[in-house]
Every structure is written in C-alpha cells, then in structure tokens.
Amino acid sequence: MYMKRRVTAVWNGTGLEGKGTLSSSNKFFDQTPYSFKTRFENEDGKAGTNPEELIAAAHAGCFNMQLSFMIVAAGFTADELTTEATVSLDPVEGGFAISSIILDLKGKVSGMDEAKFTELANAAKAGCPVSKALSATPITLNISFSA
C-alpha cells in the first residue's frame, strides 16, 4: 500500500436533527461540524461542511496536481491552475444521488498553446485518481486558457 489517509466521522442523533463531526489524523479537519442543515440548508457554508463539498475539494485538488505533472512532462511549468469543482446532489427515487460534477478550469502556462493545454487537461480529467473513483458520475470539464 503506497498511501492511506484517514478521516473519522462521528454522528449523534437522527438524520434530520442530528449533528456530526469530521476529524482527520493530521488534524486538518478537527471536529469540523456537519449536519442536515450544513448539507441542505446552509447556502454560505459557514456553519460546517458536507460530503459533497469534500468530494468537490478532493476532485479539484487531485485534478490540478495531475494536470501539473502532465504539464511538466510536456516540458512546461504552469503559472497557475485554478479549478472550481461543482458537485450536484439531486433527489432520486429512494433518496439522493450525485448527478454530475463540473470542473471549471482556468489555466495559464507560458509558452504552451491552447490545443496542447486542452489535450493535457482532458487527459488529467480521465487520469486523476479521484476522477477514476468518481467515474460512475458524469464529469464535465470547461477550460479557459491563457499563455
């Protein structure tokens, strides 16, 4: 095993009125609150986090790292890669499902042309470990590029 990461989720109470916390072994998350309210009713996100937000963070971060490695392999260095990941949770029969993920990428790579950047971005979308783990969900990549 190359790497293992752990986060502990604790939940108390009912699904609707209960509350939970998330804690990671490295203390990045340390008793971070989550609940029905933080998941479904807290638009600004200041009351805590939710699973979809964590998936979006993981996906955006993994994708940027994967793309960065691919850009270096092509002989360039990214000036900046900014990816906003949007995870959509929608009601379905029997509950909810993550219905789509949108990656909005803004990239600046001096000396690289847009066609090469687009090629690498699409390969990174397909190749990053989080994209692979989420492959049952439609993933859309929107690209904005400047050299």
Image (tube, grey):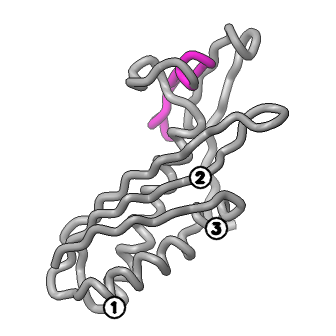
Cα distance, mark 1 to mark 2?
30 Å
Q: Nearer the viewer, mark 1 or mark 2?
A: 2
Please state if 124 lies on the left or on the right of 25 as rendered.
left
Residue in view at x 62 percent, y 61 percent: 138
Q: Find disc 2 in the rendering and name its residue.
A: 100
- Asked if the residue under mark 2 is in contact with the one under mark 1, i.e. CB atoms within 8 Å, the reply is no
- For this orientation, the residue located farthest to the bottom is 75
Please identify the quadrant where the C terminus is shown.
bottom left
Name which of mark 3 and mark 2 comes first in the sequence: 2
Identified by mark 3, the residue type is Lys
Q: Find disc 3 in the rendering and name its residue.
A: 132
Identified by mark 2, the residue type is Ser
Q: Secondary structure at mark 1?
A: loop
Identified by mark 1, the residue type is Ala
Residue in view at x 54 percent, y 70 percent: 128
> Which label was assigned to residue 74?
1
Name which of mark 1 and mark 2 comes first in the sequence: 1
Q: Secondary structure at mark 3?
A: helix
Q: Position of residue 68 (x, y in %)?
A: 35, 74
Please identify the quadrant where the N terminus is shown.
bottom right
- 140 vs 74: above or below: above
Per the rendered image, the range of residues in magenta is: 25-39
